[in-house]
Amino acid sequence: MKLGGRELAIIAAVIIMIIIVAVAVVFIQYPIAPEKRMLRWSEANVPELDPAIGSDYSGSVSYVNLYDTLVYPATNGTSLPHLATNWTISSDGLNWTFNLRQGVKFHDGSELTAEDVVFSMERIITVGRGYSYLFRGWVNQSIAVGNYTVKFVLNKSYGPFLTVLSRLYILNKDLVMEHLQPGLINFPGYFDYGTGWLLSHDAGSGPYKVKDFRKEEYVVFEKFTDYWGTFKPNAPDELKLYGITVPTTIRTMVTNRELEITDQWQTVENLDVMDQITGVDIASFPAGSVFFYMIHTRKPPTDDIHFRKAMAYAMNYTAVVTILFPGCPIARGPIPSILPGFDPTVPRYEMNLTKAHQELALSKYAANYTQYEIEVHWCAEVPDEERVANLFAENMAAVGIDVAVERTPWLTMIDEMAHMETAPHIETIFVAPHYAEAGSMLESRYHSKSTTTWEQNEWLLNDTIDSMIEDAIATINQTERFQKYSQIQHLIVEMCPSIFMFEQLEKHAYQSYYVDWYAAEGIEYVNSVMGYNLDFKNIEVDIAKKKELT
């Protein structure tokens, strides 16, 4: 039978309708997932993911995104409610009671309660690494008062206690306890306290959770959709941290739109090249980091105060901040100028070869200092440090001090600073505040309990300094506390256990055309607490704009 045109049209319409219905059914059953917003950034290393162990830059950024804290540090140095909705303090400053937000979920779906807060405090104190020094010796007892109230009883008053709680990251107790295993260090009743499992996993409630971990290569985080807080509308769905700073690799990744934000350790030349890439800008802001030449004060000849001062006076600081790290201000002692408690009256060392020779003449090594070779270890992951080290060697040669410059990987630096015998004369390190007060830098840099960590190569071990720091931090009245910080700053500068090079302007190349990053918008949006300038729930990625560039 021959079909007419009308019949053929009806059959064709029916076939088309069948196809449309079939396609619709497929889409209903297997919908196309929306394109994920990816944000990739680089750091000097893949971090320690356990918040009771790590305390460096990459670790701090990771904790901010994986975990929640009771309070959140504001850009003005105050503390905002976070997991804690409110709190009360006893008149003597020894009892702190926090009421918790209800309904907060951990990444496994279980609810966060006061018991988890108590567990997290006890764990960080017991493990005794990373940020534990902020709580160890201060917190006497942690008590769960019901499911949503926690009480901390202190051994002594602690002026910045509320501020330092931005470093108490809350872990899921039950999840950690499920993953205890024997370790190199075993804690009574807790085996390794979960440190082995937490090297590559998380037990948090933060806006992101660990998706994939490749040691010494990268970490991938994914958005936690049941997060109690808010995300910016175009916040990343996934994050990828690369542990790499090689300039050529970073430049290629930025050019190919495979990296949204670079690490802060890129060379001046590489930043200039990346600044010429369409859609890329350089974010530059002071985030509280100071570049120190940490001098071993227990190793000849740098154990002599006059020898240390001679080096401080022989250094050409102006050349460093005009040629090698342009725009960075010369440091005035150990505290960055943006940190509450900084004293602008602290004297600053300047290049003065006459004074350098005078100090050498006063040194107990005046007759034989030329026989010593001063070891300077610079961080291999930060290429510009080599040029500072070479300038330092050149400046020291002008007064007869022999310097050996050695390129040293970051993890090796950490290992060698763990022992007085293996620590070199000088380690070159950037240090940023752990909380928004001068006491943070003073304690982490110069208190005896920070020896063996990457934050102190000085081995100061000075009882007077320890007592002054402890007394200042124990002072509840902020005005009095800051006055005590001032006295310590003056004394530290006089002792010259470090060469205070400059305050770092963090500089990152970033994809400004399609990435909206709050810290790049101005100083009023910059947080002085390390890690908090990369709170990714508040950073946005515009996929459509990215496609315009690719």
Image (cartoon, rainbow, N blue to C red):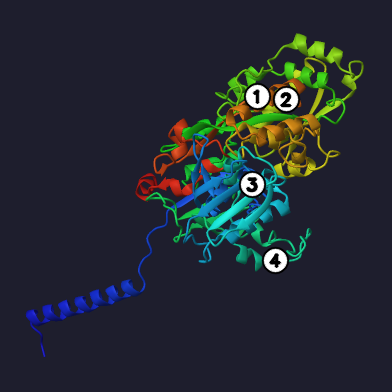
Where residue 507 sits: x, y (%)? 53, 33
**Location of mark 4 (residue):** 180
**Location of mark 3 (residue):** 45
Q: Residues within 10 Å of mark 3 (few under 14, many from 20)?
A: many
**Location of mark 2 (residue):** 492
Left or right: where 366 falls relative to 262: right
The residue positioned farthest toward the top in the image shown: 354
Instruction: Describe the element under mark 4 as helix, strand or loop.
Output: loop
Q: Earlier in the sequence, mark 3 or mark 4?
A: 3
Residue at left offset 53%, top offset 35%: 77
Tell me how far mark 3 sits from mark 1, CA to CA.
Answer: 34 Å
Q: Earlier in the sequence, mark 2 or mark 1?
A: 1
Q: Earlier in the sequence, mark 4 or mark 2?
A: 4
Instruction: Describe the element under mark 1 as helix, strand or loop.
Output: helix
Q: Earlier in the sequence, mark 4 or mark 1?
A: 4
- Label 4–label 2 contact, CB within 8 A: no
Amino acid identity at mark 3: Asn
Question: Vertically, is 499 above or below 210?
Answer: above
Label at residue 486: 1
Instruction: Describe the element under mark 3 as helix, strand or loop.
Output: loop
Q: Residues within 10 Å of mark 1 (few under 14, many from 20)?
A: many
Where residue 163 sits: x, y (%)? 57, 41
Question: Vertically, is 4 above or below 470?
Answer: below
Residue at left offset 70%, top offset 26%: 488
Amino acid identity at mark 2: Ile
Where residue 458 sits: x, y (%)? 77, 32
